[in-house]
Image (cartoon, helix red, strand yellow):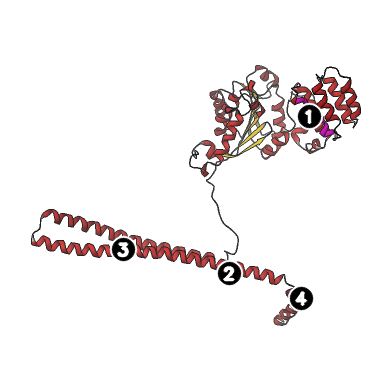
Amino acid sequence: MLDRTTIARILYSVSRDDPAHALQILGETDAVPESQRARLTDVLESGDTAVETARRLGDALADEGVEKDIVNECYRAAFYLGDRWADLAENPLYAYFLANRAGGVLHKWPHYFPIYHRHLERYRGRPVRVLEIGVYRGGGLTMWQRYFGKDAVIIGADIDEAAVRATEGRFVVELGDQADPSFLRGLHEKYGPFDVVIDDGGHTMEQQIVTAETLFPLLADDGLLIVEDTHTSYWPAFGGGLHEPTSFLAWARARVDDLNSQHHQDLDRSSVWSRQLGGVHFYDSVVVFDREPRFRAFDEVAGGSSYILADQVSERIAVESAAERERVREELASVREQSARLTAQLARVDADGSAEALVAERHELEESLRRARGERADMQSRLTSADRRDQEHAAALDALHARLAASEERLRLLEGSVSWKVTGPLRAVRRTVRHG
């Protein structure tokens, strides 16, 4: 098995574009299984760039189950041999990280820094309240204070008393278990509402899910929750595993349904995630949740030639149609009421017997009821006619839009024609004569 010293020598030869020497080092190493040696030889003989060779070495060693520190060295070499490091040169968090030689300990994946800056830059210089869960030795708290500015309130939370001692009183660090909702709610009540919560704590599935479910609804408007090191969702030791349904990433993926809850009747539109989740962003080992009280999404139409006359016509027709419908509905309601009253009276006559006076009254009521039913049929016909007129008006408007669009297209083609361009000077002379 390759040790750190041997892989360092191989990577140095790769960085010097000397694969032959790297192969020689590999050949002199006895502790490498033949299957592994064959694969690494293939990578070194591939003729790839130094960046690609270092990356492929890392992939090969990872597939062979070599310890993570050695694989990490290959990926570090690939990063610094390329030009991606230059993309981070102006990132203030990365600059602080590199310069932090005598400060509190900071242990970060470099690809986190662009993610931080992308989502957190808008809070800089503001009196924000920030909670970092997982203080370790306090280096992160100092970094966040420098990044957000002097007006920011930075609070830490950890389960280890060493974190309190490491900050030496420069920051408030509360001790407690992030898997305990009451502890998290206590932080909110005492120091919140937080604008930013950064979960860099224990990284177990329970801790990450409980923290998100408890603190996200308590964030300030326009706040966000960052959950780090979510690759533990693939590690059984933390309660995760590939395709594990109870992992944090599986839970986070379900929040995509909350974002789209109005588009399927079986999704819950009333949950806090459906109402307050503005967005969820997935990165390698990081998930970011935006808290943003939402309105129901709807579609709109704008543009085209509708600004020419058509809007006024449409509005006038809509107002007139609505008024006509209201008149017809009122009359129809009155006729229905009269019909019901006459029907009730007729029923009473039938119940009272068949005396001559009652028979005459019955005939009169039947005639009144017949007229009422006729009026009702007429009202329904008028209402149907009103709907038909609306459809005809809509068709007429569509035809108007089509004619306008055709005119615009003919005008565009005319202005682009050769004859139009050739006669341009003549038109200019005519305009001058006309206005002279």
Q: Secondary structure at mark 1?
A: helix
How far apart, in angstroms, are the residues tagged by discs 2 and 4?
Answer: 28 Å
Q: Position of residue 218 (x, y in %)?
A: 55, 33
Residue 323 is at least partly visible in this image: yes
Residue at 91% across / 30% down in the picture? Answer: 18
Residue at 10% across / 55% down in the picture? Answer: 353
Residue denoted by label 3: 377
Q: Which class describes the residues within 10 Å of circle 2: few (<14), some (14-19), or many (20+)? A: few
- Give the residue type that dot 3 points to: Ala
How far apart, in angstroms, are the residues tagged by discs 4 and 1?
Answer: 65 Å
- Give the residue type that dot 4 points to: Val
Give the mark nearer the N terminus: 3 vs 4: 3
> Does 159 lie within the magenta span?
no
Residue denoted by label 2: 403
Q: Which class describes the residues within 10 Å of circle 3: few (<14), some (14-19), or many (20+)? A: some
Residue denoted by label 1: 75
How far apart, in angstroms, are the residues tagged by discs 3 and 2?
Answer: 39 Å
How far apart, in angstroms, are the residues tagged by discs 3 and 1?
Answer: 82 Å
Q: Position of residue 287 (x, y in %)?
A: 64, 33
How far apart, in angstroms, are the residues tagged by discs 3 and 4?
Answer: 66 Å
Give the mark nearer the N terminus: 2 vs 4: 2
* Labelled pair 3, 2 in contact (Cβ < 8 Å): no
- Give the residue type that dot 2 points to: Arg
Magenta region, mostly helix, strand or loop?
helix
Give the mark nearer the N terminus: 4 vs 1: 1
- Residues drawn in magenta: 50-62
Q: Nearer the viewer, residue 222 or 277?
A: 277
Residue denoted by label 4: 422
Which of the numbered marks, if any, corresponds to residue 132? Answer: none
Q: Which class describes the residues within 10 Å of circle 1: few (<14), some (14-19), or many (20+)? A: some
Does 351 sit left or right of 170 as displayed?
left
Of all residues, the one furthest to the left in this rendering is 355
